[in-house]
Image (tube, helix red, strand yellow):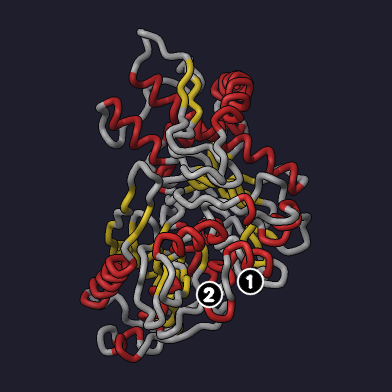
Amino acid sequence: MTERRRVLALDLGSSSVRAVVCDERAEPLPGVLARRTVEPSQDDDGRGELDPDAYLTGLVGCLDDLHEAGELDGVELVASSSQWHSVLAVGADGTPRSAALTWLDTRARPRPEHLPADPEAFHARTGAWVHPLYWSAKVPFLRAELGAGERLRFLGLPDYLRGILLGTDATSVSMASGTGLLDLTAQSWDTEAMELAGLAPDTELPAIDDTPVRLAPRWRDRWPALADARWTATLGDGAASNLGSGCTDARCVGVTVGTSAALRVVHGPDVPPPPATVWRYRVDTERLVSGVAFSGGGVLHAWAVRLLGLGPDAEPTIAPGTSGLLSVPLHAGSRPPGTTPPGSGVVSGLSLDTRPEELLAATMEGVALEAARALETLEKSFGTTLDVVLGGGAVHASPWWRRAFAATFDRRVRLAEDPEVGARGAAALALGMDLAPPGEQLEPDPEDAARMARVRVRYDRFRDPLTNDLAGDLSSPG
């Protein structure tokens, strides 16, 4: 018998780097996974950095583990899913001159004179804003930190890793779109965005090229099974999560709750420009993805159980909508285009009788309520009721959270089959296939839904004036 095709899928996240081997259907092989934990350097000033060489060491370690176990034999394709938005400076010799700034880093502040002439047109072209998340603000910040002198180039973390492993640091159209500097239609660097970031695309940015490549010669002896494997273009993690959940077209919205949370819709080019609060990036040269993201997801559950002295897997013991509290989940601030700074989380309704399970439930409900607001925005934009696929490590680990999401959306939701949705999505794209939506479904409990509808009315009245007061000035230094 001929051995079946294998795909090595790399998931380059902000909390871990993972290597998963998938079969020809993009299904992860049971137990064939290598993982290294990643710990970003963070502080109260907004720092959120990764050491690029330590990250490389972790990735190499994952590949070593699979090689030593004989699990790389038969791998024909290597697919990658990576965190969007990271950036680091490298010198002329290609070595890092800075740490990699991740999406967690909020220190960059665009100056008033470095804002688009027409912000609405800029957003329509790039799907982004001039904001601390994007390179339009992060690159000037890095230049100021490093000072004048050496000529620098700027790469995303996956581009740097590919430069070492593959001999080319060309970026993919998907990763380029996450910088906030790409003209989404032309699929090339946007002229105005370059000027705002103070960049010369021919000398200071990577080329954009989705052509598959092979492992650089220096690594072929280390992993001989990968010597002839084709490494496909890196896919942004949000797009990969949708594809891996079977959410591959504009009939479906992927609701992913991991450390953070997001709602995303994959679609073709023939749709109107994104609404004012919706970002848009590219999946590949054919498809785009539009969505809304939140800094608060599973990290809020971890915060709550730590604060309350509960076990890491603790679940509320009360039904959704019965806590009597309102929790606005802005503890880690807001994502673009929001400007609410970290430290802005609010809980309303606390009393001397409030119990730990009530605070935990309200915290988790707050994430679901934010997602429901975003779902309304996306459905209005696409002019249809969207099929919901719920996935991500945090909701996979929490039956209560899945119940609360179904109740808050007040509709049947599909449940992603595997928590490794990013790896599956990258593998599926490399194989040229679309995964089917998952079959498992969850119906909302009518009583839960009625209670959460009443909570939603109170939440909306409370939240909007509050967040208007909390919003910060992006041009201020902190």
Q: Position of residue 371 (x, y in %)?
A: 57, 38
Task: Tell me what residue is drawn at x 33 percent, y 57 percent.
Answer: 16
SS state under label 2: loop
**Kind of residue at badge 1:** Trp
Residue at figure coordinates x 61%, y 30% from the top left: 468
Q: Which amino acid type is marked by label 2?
A: Leu
Front residue of this view, candidates 329 and 288? 329
Instruction: Provide the residue designation for mark 2.
Output: 205
Residue situated furthest front in the rendering:
148
Q: Is disc 1 surrounded by few (<14), some (14 to 19) or many (20+) residues within 10 Å?
A: many
Give the image location of residue 388, x and y in percent. Answer: 60, 45
Report which quarter residue 470 is drawn in.
Answer: top right
Which of these two is toward me, 306 or 471?
471
Quarter occupied by residue 284: bottom right
Q: Position of residue 256 (x, y in %)?
A: 50, 47
Task: Give left or right: position of 274 versus 224.
Answer: right
Q: Residue furthest top?
A: 352
> Can residue 446 be seen by looking at this rendering?
no
Front position in the image: 343 or 143: 143
What is the number of the mark on residue 409? none
| Dots 2, 1 in contact, CB < 8 A | yes
Residue carrying label 1: 189
Query: Regarding mark 1 in the picture, which secondary structure is present there?
Result: strand
Marks 2 and 1 sit apart, C-alpha to C-alpha, by 9 Å
